[in-house]
Image (tube, rainbow, N blue to C red):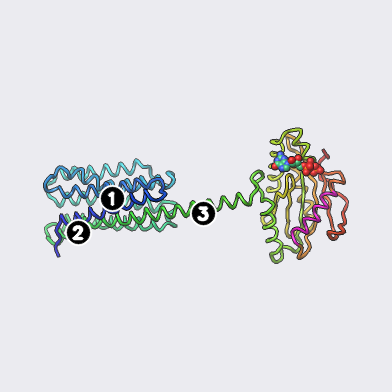
Amino acid sequence: MTFHPPTLLLCSVLAMAMSAGLMTLFAFSQRIYRGYFHWTAAQALAALGLGLHLLRDTHPAVLPVANLLVLQWPVLLLAGLRRFYQRKEMTLPAAFDWALLVGGYLLWLSTWISQADLMWRIAAFSFAAGALALYTAALLVRLDGYATSAGLKTLSVALFVSCGMHVWRMVHSVIVRHDPDSAQVLLLAGAVIPVMLSLVMVYLALLLTYERTQHDLGESQRQLRELANIDMLTQVPNRRHFHELAGRLLASPGAAHGASLLMFDIDHFKGINDRFGHKAGDEALCDVARSLRDTLRVGDVAGRIGGDEFVVVLPHTTVEEAVAVASRIVDPLASRPQMPLGLSFGVVRVEAGESVDAALHRADQALYEAKRQGRSCAVIATGDNENPVFAESMPLGLMPM
Ligand SMILES: Nc1nc2c(ncn2[C@@H]2O[C@H](COP(=O)(O)OP(=O)(O)OP(=O)(O)O)[C@@H](O)[C@H]2O)c(=O)[nH]1
């Protein structure tokens, strides 16, 4: 089978122009990301470069422009990827891309000027194009998102294949140079490579856009969940989320057995707000939350359930051990340089099968009793919710304010 070179070239140009057109159309109808226009420009310029090849027999002077437009493709593709991904993710700076393009182009240009033999000219061009494809593929596989991106994997495979075809084309143009069948195959390869890459590029641009949209959507959902669950001031779970977490914890087999619950608040917090201002009050709340987070183990569940009111569920912990935890929460707050803070605690054991609300109710009564007994202390409540029995308060080392 023989091919008619101008017809083959025209088909390639049309395919590339259509892919550039499709990408442009997509850009105007969808939300696109940074870098997308570089990819579209790479396609359009390569199509233009191939189109100029149609004039090479009648106007040989167009060749230097035509080949530069074809060779730029991997470098503009990388420029787009550098904008799409974080700049720091690429292992080499952009200057390397452009230096390689200039080097490859000058190699072909000097061969074109110095060699009348068409085969050597083809070999030089294939060498430059193959090196650029290999370099681009090597950078892609080192990207952080490579392992999870079908688009990047497809593109890198296409680039490796393209590199292989260029090497094969180079070897054939130099070694099997006078075989007419080979000339046909070389011609076919020269037309197929750009079309293959441009089709992969359309797929990649759509897929990367889709992957980025999915990623952004997941990130927004994560942020929304955080906004709905976490108290923004203190960064501990809010009341609703605490109920969820504590309910799940107490329902888990074994965890409910031997769990304790601590409810505490800052003594005379209203006075702190009134005397030092709301900002100082907010800072006090943040310091309490920090001490709470630093003290808890993995598996403990804490929450801010009111203005200055916090609660903690400690699985596999006796009430005596829970009082020791309370003391550890208070310790750093006692040496606060701005003003020492006093905390009062209600401590209860969570009975097997008991709901979070029932345990909270008893802890609230114990906290009230701790306030009544002079604050800066912990009171353990036993018995049931109707008839709680309060133990003697245990001071937690802070002077009452
Ligand atoms: N700075 C600040 N204050 C808050 C916040 N939420 C609630 N408050 C204030 O916290 C104070 C809570 O005070 P009270 O519940 O009366 O208790 P208290 O003054 O600590 O008194 P005792 O608990 O009896 O020792 C109120 O004045 C609320 O306005 C907040 O997010 N930031």
Query: At 38% from the left edge and 54% from the top edge, which residue is drawn?
Result: 206
Residue tagged 3: 218
Q: Nearer the viewer, residue 165 or 60?
A: 60
Residue tagged 2: 188
The kind of secondary structure element at disc 1 is helix
Mark toward the start of the polypeptide (3 vs 1): 1
Predominant SS along the magenta part = helix
Residue 157, magenta (yes or no): no
Q: Can the viewer see residue 66? A: yes
Residue 100 circle label: none
Quadrant housing residue 315: bottom right
What's the amino acid at mark 2?
Answer: Leu
What's the amino acid at mark 1?
Answer: Ala
Indicate yes or no: mark 1 CB to ligand 1 under 8 Å: no
Quadrant housing residue 173: bottom left
Q: Nearer the viewer, residue 286 or 385?
A: 385
Span colored in magenta: 355-369
Residue 208: x and y, percent? 40, 53
